[in-house]
Image: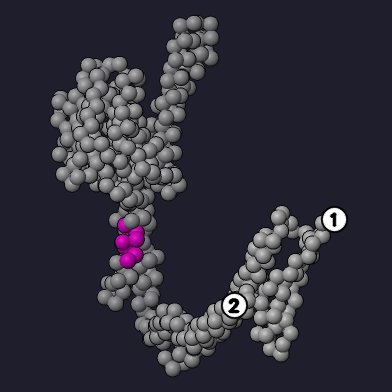
Amino acid sequence: MKQTEKPRSTSIARRLNRHFRLQQLGGIFASDLALAVFAVCLWCYLAEAERVAKWTLWMDRSITLGEGGTLWQMLQGATYSFTLRGAQAQAFTVDAGRFLSIFAAVMAVVFVCQIIGWLCKCASGTAEIRRYLKPIDDIAQAAERASAQQFDESKFRDLEDAIYHINAATPDAKLSIGDTELAGLEAAVNNLMKRMHESYRQQVRFVDDASHELRTPIAVIQGYTNMLDRWGKDDETVLNESIAAIKTESDHMRTLVEQLLFLARGDMGRQQFKPEQIALADMLQEIHEESEMIDHKHPYALRIDRPCAVLADPAMLKQAVRILVDNAAKYTPEGGGITLRLRADERGCPCIDVQDEGIGVAQKDVSHMFERFYRSDAARSSQTGGSGLGLSIAKWIVDQHGGYFEVASAEGIGTRVSIHLPQKTETQTSASVRSA
């Protein structure tokens, strides 16, 4: 079998080598010709510019080869003539023999080196191409050996019957053949089905939660619209109340849709990520000033332990920190303080802390707080609104920066959420959530 494959791959390698070498030879001639034309034109320009006060393209030019029996003698005796046109016509003759002879000698050496290299490639090209073709030959030989083997047809029937009776709608459905020779195939199919079922469950849960969150504002808008249609047109109180409610629910629904689109684009890999060097201290200063201007119910503090710069998407990272600040404000009673801090963690890497004096998070909820649509009982009872998607978006952003979250919380005391960033930010597929 190997004796029949080797000549086949060798003949293909020879044809490919011949094709590539002819292309390379044509490239050598074309590049040398272009270099020669450029060098001669440049020398002519320099010769003209040295002798003419104002150089112009419109001149009569000619090169005359010298007399002699060999090409070398003709080049050594060559002259270059050019004449200005117009009323002040003036003719010039320059000795071009020295330039042409030196340039021809240099080009001859270069061309000889190129041809030697080309010949070496011709000699070794076939073997090199065969090395590249070897994996293809191995695959072909493996396929031929597999096709030559004799399989028990009953095994194929058992495999076909087992696949036919798999119920894809059952979460725990598995392929079971009971044949040790097909155990690898069975494990691969079962692992694939497990991942597919998990992805399907996450998708169904996401759609159900999104539908549930959208159902409430739509119902409120429909209720007030029907009330306005029945008797609220002439009642100013009902009219104002309906308009305010519709505006509030519309804003909530718009925010929810934007968050869903953000996560959907992130899951599909279509969310733009543009890292650049940014100063974290300046970013936190901006967020601190914005928070003080927007929220007058909480005192804000800013601590910069160590100014540092990281490679990050400024808009995305700022959005993640804002989400943490908004959450801290939602779940902190009026008058409770919120602190933003920039420090170095135990590894010496940048770390951003957002600490509040709010209601805190129960330990059983810490590991779930970054899940989509998850809200703890305390968060639901606080009537602060929200969709439960903010922290999921923040986690996706931190994941893209190669960082992770650390959460420390005590009920009735407060919560500290820390963003740990690497010194050299690289996109990672996932980030861990640590609870303290």
Considering depth in this image, is 89 or 381 the residue closer to the camera?
A: 89
Q: What is the secondary structure assignment of the residue under circle 1?
A: loop
Q: Amino acid at mark 1?
A: Ala
Residue found at x 23% / y 39%: 351
Q: What is the secondary structure assignment of the residue under circle 2?
A: helix
Q: Amino acid at mark 2?
A: Ile
- Determine which of the numbered discs, if any, sits on residue 29 in the image: none
- Determine which of the numbered discs, if any, sits on residue 102 in the image: 2
Give the residues drawn in magenta, as a range.
Answer: 188-194
Q: Main secondary structure of the magenta part?
A: helix
Say which quarter of the image contains residue 332: top left
Q: Position of residue 296 (x, y in %)?
A: 30, 16
Residue found at x 50% / y 5%: 235
Residue located beneath label 1 in the image: 87
Q: Position of residue 214 (x, y in %)?
A: 42, 31
Q: Is residue 377 left or right of residue 34?
A: left
Q: Position of residue 21 (x, y in %)?
A: 56, 81
Q: Is residue 426 left or right of residue 271?
A: left
Question: How many other residues sit within 10 Å of disc 1, few (<14), some (14-19) or many (≥20)?
Answer: few
Say which quarter of the image contains residue 45: bottom right
Q: Is 276 located above or below residue 298 in the figure?
A: below
User: Would residue 192 be counted in the magenta stretch?
Assistant: yes
User: Would residue 225 be counted in the magenta stretch?
Assistant: no
Q: Quadrant of the C terminus?
A: top left
Question: Residue 21: in sight, yes or no?
Answer: no
Residue sitting at the far bottom: 3
Q: Are marks 2 and 1 in contact (CB under 8 Å)?
A: no
Marks 2 and 1, the one that precedes in the sequence: 1
Give the distance between the C-alpha atoms of the residues marked 2 and 1, in whole angstroms: 37 Å
Question: Residue 58: in sight, yes or no?
Answer: yes
Residue found at x 41% / y 79%: 135
Q: Is 101 located above or below residue 246 in the figure?
A: below
